[in-house]
Amino acid sequence: MVLSIRNQFTGIVSEVVHGSVMGTVAMEISGGHTLTATVTMDAIKELGVGVGSPVAALIKSTDISVAIRETAGLSIRNKLRGTLVDLDSGGAMSVARIALGEGLEITAAITRAAAEELGLEPGVEVTALIKSTEVSFAAV
């Protein structure tokens, strides 16, 4: 299957927190980063994932925000620090490519106005912010 989702990461489940309806699944990906997904308990059971399971995380580029300063005081679970390596702007939107280390990149689609207000340009240290409800995963 080929997907249009740009951000696809493989990793290993490091923690599963069970709830009555929803649960969280934390996965370790390259570069020492952790991604957390919040999904239904039905999905966790149907996929059969547990600690040690290999998974693929999927994140749409439009579900990623970009920050240029410290990000304390946010409820967002996924905060991936990196360096902006490319910014492609046109019309109303910009696509930011962020290097996370060890050959790992994440792509964020943000408004051109936001990119300009943040002063984004290659070499700037940024944080990719992703709510855990916007991370999907698949068992591999």
Image (cartoon, helix red, strand yellow):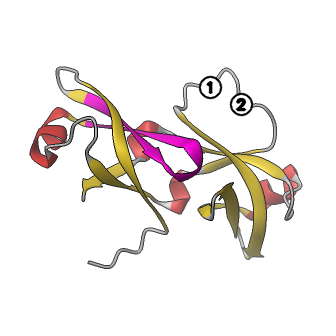
Q: Which mark is residue 71?
A: 2
Q: Which mark is residue 32?
A: none
In magenta stretch: residue 85: no
SS assignment for the magenta stretch, majority: strand
Q: Position of residue 101 (x, y in %)?
A: 67, 56
Question: Compared to 16, does 45 lie above or below?
Answer: below
- The quadrant of the image that shows the C terminus is bottom left
Position of 120 with respect to 47 (left or right) is right
Cα separation, mark 1 vs mark 2, equals: 7 Å
Residue type of the residue flagged with mark 2? Thr
State the extent of the magenta-drawn residues as a range.
23-39
Q: Position of residue 72 (x, y in %)?
A: 70, 24
Q: Which mark is residue 74?
A: 1
Element on which disc 2 rests? loop
Q: Nearer the viewer, residue 108 or 50?
A: 50
Q: Nearer the viewer, residue 109 or 125?
A: 125
Corner quadrant of residue 58: bottom left
Q: Position of residue 92 (x, y in %)?
A: 71, 69
**Residue plotted at (72% across, 50% down):** 82
Q: Nearer the viewer, residue 23 or 101?
A: 101
In magenta stretch: residue 27: yes
Question: Compared to 38, does 139 lie above or below?
Answer: below
**Residue plotted at (57% across, 43% down):** 32
Residue type of the residue flagged with mark 1? Leu
**Residue plotted at (67% across, 20% down):** 73
Mark 1 surroundings within 10 Å by alpha-carbon count, few (fewer than 14), some (14 through 19), many (20 or more) = few
Q: Nearer the viewer, residue 26 or 23?
A: 26
- The quadrant of the image that shows the N terminus is bottom left
| Residues tagged 1 and 2 counted as in contact (Cβ below 8 A) | yes
